[in-house]
Every structure is written in C-alpha cells, then in structure tokens.
Amino acid sequence: MFVRTYGMLYMQNSEVFQDLFIELKRYYTGGNVNLEEMLNDFWARLLERMFQLINPHYHFSEDYLECVSKYTDQLKPFGDVPRKLKVQVTRAFIAARTFVQGLTVGREVANRVSKVIKIISFCCQLFLFCCCPGDSSFYALSFMVCSFPSMSTL
C-alpha cells in the first residue's frame, strides 16, 4: 500500500516505518516497550527525514536535526495527527496485548487440563483393573464413577 501510494519516497525511507512496526509487534507480544516513548521517537525520526526531503539542497548535521526534533511539540509539523494517533494506537495495542496474553494463558490452561484428564482417566482404568475383576455389581458401580472420558474420546 505504501509503495503504491508513495513509490520511491517510501522505499528510500521505509526503515522508519519498519522499525515502528517491529516495535509495535514487540509490544503486543509482551516485550518491555513504552508505547508513548516509541511513538514519540517515530515522529521525531519521521520529522528529521521529512525535513531533509523538503530541503534537499541543504545538508544538516545530526545536532541540527536533533534540535529540530526537540521542538516538534512547539512546531507541530504534522498538526494534531501524532497526538490523535498516539491515543488510538495506545488504546488498540493495549487491547491487542491483553488479547495475546489471554490466548497464551488459555493455551497453558488447556494443556494443563488435558494432562489432568489423562491422569484421571488412567487412575479410573487402573482402579477398574485392580479392584473389579470378579464382583459385577461393584464393577457396574465403579464403571459409573469412572466413566470419565479418556483423551481418545475428547
């Protein structure tokens, strides 16, 4: 989408966006990432790139570009977009991170429950094998108690 819309301009500066996407993925998969700081860094890097692209006839030192990015809040080169996007991205990624963490916990619970079911099924089968060889009434009662589904029937 970006390549079709912005062409070579995007291709030459894609690492700014790729770094953003990598950090966002790291955040929602549980990494120790400060969303606000990460988004501020993205807008500062984008401003530095845009400043250079808008003024191609000049060569700016790193110190000068850092100075420009320090005054981003006062200059507001992107208008109110960074603030609005920060709110939306933060809200969305907190939900995404919570969802991913919930899926991880759900997987762990399912794995533990499947182990417990195997153990209970084994115990019932062992009980039937050891204690119920001759007494059919006791066998019928124990069969009702131990009719817990085995893993093969789940």
Image (cartoon, grey):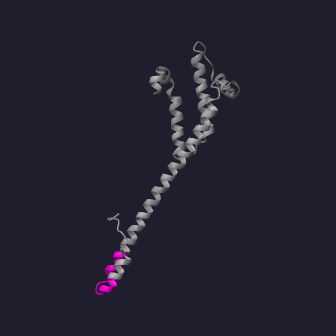
Q: Main secondary structure of the magenta part?
A: helix
Q: Nearer the viewer, residue 125 or 18?
A: 125
In the displayed structure, 138 sits above or below 42; it is below
In the displayed structure, 110 sits above or below 10; it is below
Residue 31 visible somewhere in the drawing = no
Q: Which residue sits at x=57%, y=38%?
A: 89
Q: Residue 88 location, x and y as percent?
A: 59, 38
- Looking at the image, which residue sits at the far bottom? 135
127 left or right, relative to 79: left
Q: Residue 123 location, x and y as percent?
A: 38, 75
Q: Residue 64 location, x and y as percent?
A: 66, 22
Q: Which residue sits at x=34%, y=85%?
A: 138
> For the image shown, how many numbered marks are present on the structure?
0
Q: Which quarter shows the C terminus?
A: bottom left
Q: Nearer the viewer, residue 69 or 60?
A: 69
Quarter location, residue 58: top right
In the displayed structure, 38 sits above or below 135; it is above
Question: Is residue 127 located in the magenta-colored stretch of the structure?
Answer: yes
Q: Which residues are magenta?
A: 124-139
Q: Which residue sits at x=50%, y=21%?
A: 9
Question: Is residue 36 located in the magenta-colored stretch of the structure?
Answer: no
Q: Which residue sits at x=69%, y=26%?
A: 71
Q: Residue 59 location, x and y as percent?
A: 60, 16
Quarter location, residue 152: bottom left
102 left or right, relative to 120: right
Residue 103 visible somewhere in the drawing = yes
